Amino acid sequence: MVNAFRGVRYNPDKINDFSSVLAPPYDVISPEEQSELYEKDPYNVIRLILRKGEDDRKYAEASETFRRWIGEEILIQDREPCLYPYYQEFEENGKMVTRKGFIAAVRLEDFSSKRILPHEQTFPKHKQDRLKLTIACKANLSPVFSIYSDPEGTVEKSIEENLSEEPIIEAVNKEGVKNRLWRVFDPDLISEIKNQMLNRNLLIADGHHRYETALEYRNIQRRKYGNSSGDKAYDFVLMYLSRAEGEGLIIKPTHRVVKSLGSLDVESLLKKLSERFRLEKVSFSEGISNIGHREFVVVTKDPDFVFRSSSKSSFSVSYDNLGVMLLHKLVFGEILKEEEAQILYTKSTEEVVNLVRGGEYKLGFILSHISPLDIFDVSMAGEKMPHKTTYFYPKLLSGLVFHLLD
């Protein structure tokens, strides 16, 4: 399931500062940041993962750039198959923590096998964009982020005991996160890690569109070449794997701000909410602290108070009682029309408050943290959480290593 691969990566003899050529995932980059990254370095990975342009020529141009950089040895390919341990050190609640994981080529599985599990919905438009880029470049340019359960940390320990002193890449991003990448090429250690990862379910944390794109690309190649042996490069996808029990696996909630209430005003909506939920009017500071797993908080223009909301009745399936599930089932499913609400998603409670109190949006919904085990429960049941439920922090950097598919 987990394989070593000959990664393509930036040549340390040509790149003096790795932080100048790496970038966040494409889907969190604003147009302003895209321009900043373009200006930052002529070899920044933005020219591959999110090339400027309005038509499909940008995919061909990304491919030409990718092949040119390989030809000029800006990018080099490792001679032996490797696994790539990737650590991110950052501050969380005043404490320095490290998220540990590794990048590998992971055999693609249809979701029906339940070996690799999604937890969020996806959109066709985004998948089409990534598919065109994959077809043009014949490579995975950014990793899918997945988590696995390993309470004893056996995989992590095997890797940590064999790390070289110096990483091959070290870079600090603009949020102050220290990113370090190593490579492991000892065949015995790789074999040990592969065996330890056998029969573990993987949960996609981030990169659902990239994973589903990889499945579609695999299917296209199988139809084209008539080969379904499962051992071709396109049968695998570039993936970062981190254990669910690790101290550095931080999952932040993604809050919602609503612009349109349809035919309702705020007062009538609160009245409808009170029919399905226990609404407790509390001070702002009390309301947004320690939100329960089965609660969400409603923010109005009121500068002093918010409404802490919990369901009056409990669903028989435990995960249906999670705050985000209640919000989408009972509020966006029954009171408001989700597709007409003009929802903005944000990880910032401050932005929720500013948008609502500024009058641009009618209501805000602040959600609680979700644990990896909550997500596993939903996924193992064959269900999916609403779009943009989770925000795994920090984001993985793009440009650390690429996986060729041809």
Image (spheres, rainbow, N blue to C red):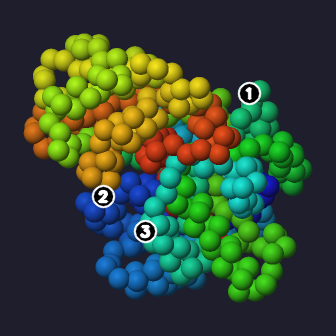
Q: Would you call the spot at circle 2 few (<14 residues within 10 Å), some (14-19), or many (20 or more)?
A: few
Residue 119 percent location from the top left of the image = 57, 46
Residue drawn where x is 24% and y is 14% of the image: 281
Residue drawn where x is 26% and y is 40% of the image: 257
Q: Secondary structure at mark 3?
A: helix
- Left or right: residue 157 compared with residue 380: right
Q: Would you call the spot at circle 3 few (<14 residues within 10 Å), some (14-19), or many (20 or more)?
A: few
Q: Which residue is mark 3?
A: 125
Q: As displayed, is residue 353 above or below residue 87?
A: above
Residue drawn where x is 55% and y is 46% of the image: 384
- Left or right: residue 21 compared with residue 168: left
Q: Which residue is mark 2?
A: 30
For the residue marked with disc 2, what is the amino acid? Ser
For the residue marked with disc 1, what is the amino acid? Pro
Of label 3 and label 2, which has the lower sequence position? 2
Distance of mark 2 from mark 1, alpha carbons? 37 Å
Q: Is residue 97 visible?
A: no
For the residue marked with disc 3, what is the amino acid? Lys
Residue 355 sits in which quadrant? top left
